[in-house]
Amino acid sequence: MGFLALPTSRGLLLLFIAITATAVAYVNSGLITAFSAALSGAVFLSGFLMAQLSIAGYRVERHFLQDGNCGEPLYLSLTLQNRFPFYRQSCVLLEQYPFCLSGQNAFVIPPLAPRETFTALHHIKAEKRGVFFLKKVYLVSGDPLGLFRKKKRFILPAHVEIHPRIMGIESLATVNKSGGLSDPEGRNLGRAGNGPEFFGVRPYRMGDEVRHIHWKSTAMQGKLMVKEFEASAVDQIVILLDTEKKHKSMEPCSNNFEFLVSCAASISEYLSSKYCHLRFAAADGNGDLHHITGDASSVNKKLKQLLLTLEESELDYASVLNAVTESIPPRSIVYFLSMSHPAVPDCISVLEEQDCSCFWIYAPPENFPPVSPDVPRIVDREKAKKSLNKHCMPDIADFSTGPEILESRSGHEKI
């Protein structure tokens, strides 16, 4: 980019002086006027030549580009090599980073010795999630007097994944209703109950169903024996994320939708090392419903890829709840992550009748106002409560809310 060095404002001023001095020397010839015209013209021309050659012979390579999470530093490495056998003045390395609000990042390269290689290792704060593609890197330099500016483009393709912000959760608020004992690795031991898995056989008791009689054991024991089944000993945890577009606040990065995406990612990340069953449901930008279920570790891997590019949807939250409520097993632990409130209380009432433990995190758009350099972000925390059902109050989040909203409360057990 830019085959020729371009003059700066200082260079344009010197060009004007050189032209004026030349005109004066032509009209009124003399030693002083001729010397002034020649000197200004020589300085202008030498500045152009030095700027033109200032970044010739450089080689730029990208070593690595690290994936990261929103709100955390992202480390980048670019190597600059001086291939010429003489010293070079300092220059500036520029690159556009679409995952940052500031966009362009500048890094100063110090003067380099002949054949010297310099590695620019720097870190920046990632502020937007998604998959981003980088391509162009610019090297900018000029002459020592600052009369000209030379810019050269290097094509260094790369891509980076910025995942949602992960909040450090020390313990997750739950009500563990599975009961029973645990093994040394923290997994609940099986116990008799009404689950789908075979547990063993026992003597017949009044009220047992005939279809559960174990005939082989009955013949061996000489008395009626029945099959016994294992109750579920694994916590069933459900995350229901609201992606309804019309309830998203106007702030591009630190808005209520991004906060709830961060909550979902944080819960999943915390549970990935626990022995539990995890379900996740949300609508995407195309209006399709994503319903992921499985052990927490495998779900976390799938959920990371989904949340990486998940966008707001036209599908309302009530439709998502209606679609998945019937499939939620009894005694589950359900997290409602919502930007609106009308559909949630009725769903909670239905699930509580199935002995489910429900936790509702409500992030209204008015609690996430736009960031302005002139106006501080102020939230009326009582305003959101006025429109809510007092018999089903959520935990209300705002732009300053941290991981404490997800952590254990009194009266609840911990995962």
Image (tube, rainbow, N blue to C red):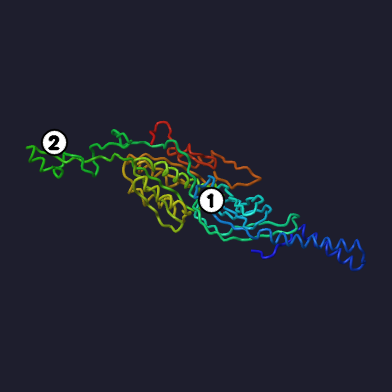
| Residue that lies at the very extreme toward the bottom in this rendered image | 26
Viewer-proximal residue among 338 and 120 = 120
Residue 104 lies, with reference to residue 181, above or below; the image says: below
Q: Under tag 2, what secondary structure? A: strand
Question: What is the quadrant of the N terminus in the image?
Answer: bottom right
On the image, numbered disc 1 is attached to which residue?
128
Label 1 is placed on what type of residue? Answer: Lys
Question: Which mark, residue 336?
Answer: none
Horizontal arrangement in the rendering, residue 42 relative to residue 275 (left or right): right
Residue 218 lies, with reference to residue 243, above or below; the image says: above
Viewer-proximal residue among 88 and 340 = 88
* Residue 376 in the image, given as x and y percentages of width and height: 62, 42
* Residue 126 in the image, given as x and y percentages of width and height: 54, 48
Q: Under tag 1, what secondary structure? A: loop
On the image, numbered disc 2 is attached to which residue?
203
* Residue 149 in the image, given as x and y percentages of width and height: 70, 59
Q: Residue at x 73, y 62 (%)?
A: 49
Q: Nearer the viewer, mark 2 or mark 1?
A: 1
Crowding at mark 2 (Cα within 10 Å: few <14, some 14-19, many 20+): some
Horizontal arrangement in the rendering, residue 395 relative to residue 298 (left or right): right
Residue 84 lies, with reference to residue 241, above or below; the image says: below
